[in-house]
Amino acid sequence: MKCPKKLSMAKSLPLYEKLIIKRPTQRALDIAIFILLISLVAYRVLLMYNHGFSHLQTIAFLCEFWFSFVWFLAIVTRWNPVDFKTYPQRLLKREVEYPAVDIFVTTADPMLEPPIITVNTVLSLMALDYPSNKLSCYVSDDGCSPLTFYALNEALNFAKIWIPFCKKYDVQVRAPFMYFSTPPHHLHSSTQFQYDWKTLKVEYEKLERKIKEAEENRIGWHEESGIDLAAFSNISTKHHPSIIKILWENKEVSDELPHLIYVSREKSFKHHHHCKAGAMNVLTRVSGVLTNAPYILNVDCDMFVNNPQVVLHAMCVFLNSKDDLEDIGYVQTPQCFYDGLKDDPFGNQLVVVFEYSARGIMGLQGPFYSGTGCFHRRKVLYAQFPHHTIYFLDGKASEQELIKTFGYSKTFAKSATYAFKDQNTNTSGYPPKGLLNNNLEAANQVAGCGYEISTSWGSEIGWMYGSTSEDVLTGLVIQTRGWRSIFLALNPPAFLGCAPSQLVASLTQQKRWASGFLQVLLNRRHCPIFGTLFGKLQWKQCAAYLWILTWGLRSIPELSYTLLPPYCLITNSSIFPTTL
């Protein structure tokens, strides 16, 4: 029997700690550089005033002014760095029922994103240190690939022995491909452990071989698998009905496998699909009518779990009793990589952004949403304001109002009312437990490509449309409503992913980022400047958004300023006075 005094102490201890990071030297250097830049701009103005204007001096002035402006934004962004330390062991000591979490995994192309990578991510998520009956894993296959569906079915059989092994031996890295890439290491390398390790390794190699043979389209793999693939017959990846399959349903057993649901939304040549944002909104609706967990974790298919307690760490933030955390809309983890090139020549690992800028932004209104490794409150995605402030609906909205906003599915509208009531444990929530198959018809309905017509999806609720950087735009809209966010940098890192290792892939990725940032910056409805003037976005947070959103534009003044000296040498001209 637990001591009442110890239980009381465990409940009174905070689940997180805010740490102020002091960087006096960095601050002094930032200010010194800013003063030098302002001095240069002032000198350029006086120079043009005394000696007249020229096209070279004007270009130089504009570039130098831009550099000063960007440096000011950088100073504001990282002026007050903070960090958060969470204490999951304190949460474990509390006698509370953990809230349910819906996990979204997104994949789009089995050629660019091999199914074995998706399988490893799913296996690592299903093996999290969290009650299995509180987890539901949804895999969105935007390529509608029978190969991905087949790989998940095969992985499910492996999961039945892999997850107990991870829990039994407290395995840290729970993606099999990474775990078996090194020799076995365990504090108690018993004979039983060695036997179990070898058995699991053999089974994983069988799984790899089956998926590889299917990828190579070996004759007969469809029949040998014994898996019903009729739903994938005679369909196109860009035109097909919705396919939703419940691969595994947890019967409310905490040490069993979590729910595993395959989702391929309906596609039609007549409807815009809105890329990843559209897929995420479909997952939000499908999960709403099937499990309706109050929290959502979204992960890219190539980001496997590296810290199995990551959900407990996130819950330390959401479940903390202090009032100052009631306005936390989402918890973002940094993007870390396991296979990055030495010295990161292409800048794909985003070390500066996550190590320095993100902690500075956390001292403001919180980090940007970066598209993966993020925990969301479901009601926040449904456009709720913090502290139950009414925007255009709240938990007491009529069914007719909900249908007008969320679509014509009465099942989903009913589930939304429970989301607004913030039913954390879902013990008396909706939909009822253990009836996933009963709501499959409603799930297929909300996965239809025409469901969002004349609704608020993509404009006010869910993931926002209008930019290829839908993640940054969605986070901006959430913070404009007054929500804050937390940057959760764990040790070891929460997730590890695969960074582009080739120049062409890196340039393609960075081009998409740059164009997406500009689309957000020029968005007529959700520009950060409008968010500060007419919303609840703090002006310093606005400066942080401007700092990141103008990233693509910086190449123009930087290239122009770089070309000025050689141009002056060739033309025998100067951007500085030749006489005093």
Image (cartoon, helix red, strand yellow):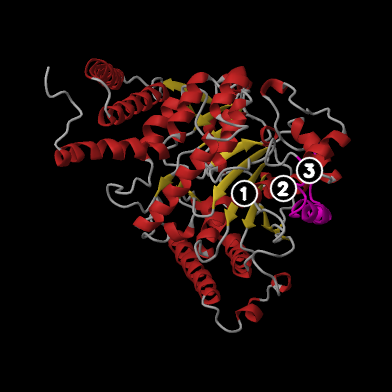
Q: What residue would you read off at disc 3?
A: 454
- How many residues crowd around disc 1 within 10 Å: few (fewer than 14), some, or many (20 or more)? many
Q: Residue furthest bottom?
A: 219
**Which one is earlier in the sequence, the residue at label 2 or at label 1?**
1
- How many residues crowd around disc 3 within 10 Å: few (fewer than 14), some, or many (20 or more)? few
Q: Position of residue 376 (x, y in %)?
A: 62, 37
Q: Secondary structure at mark 1?
A: strand
Q: Quadrant of residue 294?
A: top right
Task: Name the one closer to the observer, 115 or 533.
Answer: 533
Q: Secondary structure at mark 2?
A: helix
Q: Which residues are magenta?
A: 428-455
Q: Amino acid at mark 2?
A: Ser
- Tell us which disc is closer to us: 1 or 3: 3
Q: Amino acid at mark 1?
A: Phe
For the residues bearing labels 2 and 1, Cβ distance under 8 angstroms: yes
Q: Amino acid at mark 3?
A: Ser
**Which one is earlier in the sequence, the residue at label 3 or at label 2?**
2
Q: Quadrant of residue 553?
A: top left
Q: What residue would you read off at disc 1?
A: 104
Give the answer, above or below, for where 45 lies relative to 446. above
Task: Name the one closer to the observer, 322 or 44.
Answer: 44
Whole-angstrom CA distance, mark 3 to mark 2, is 21 Å
| Residue in view at x 55 percent, y 48 percent | 299
Characterize the magenta stretch by its predominant secondary structure.
loop
Q: Residue furthest left?
A: 579
| Residue in view at x 46 percent, y 29 percent | 546
Magenta includes 445?
Answer: yes
Q: What residue would you read off at disc 2?
A: 287
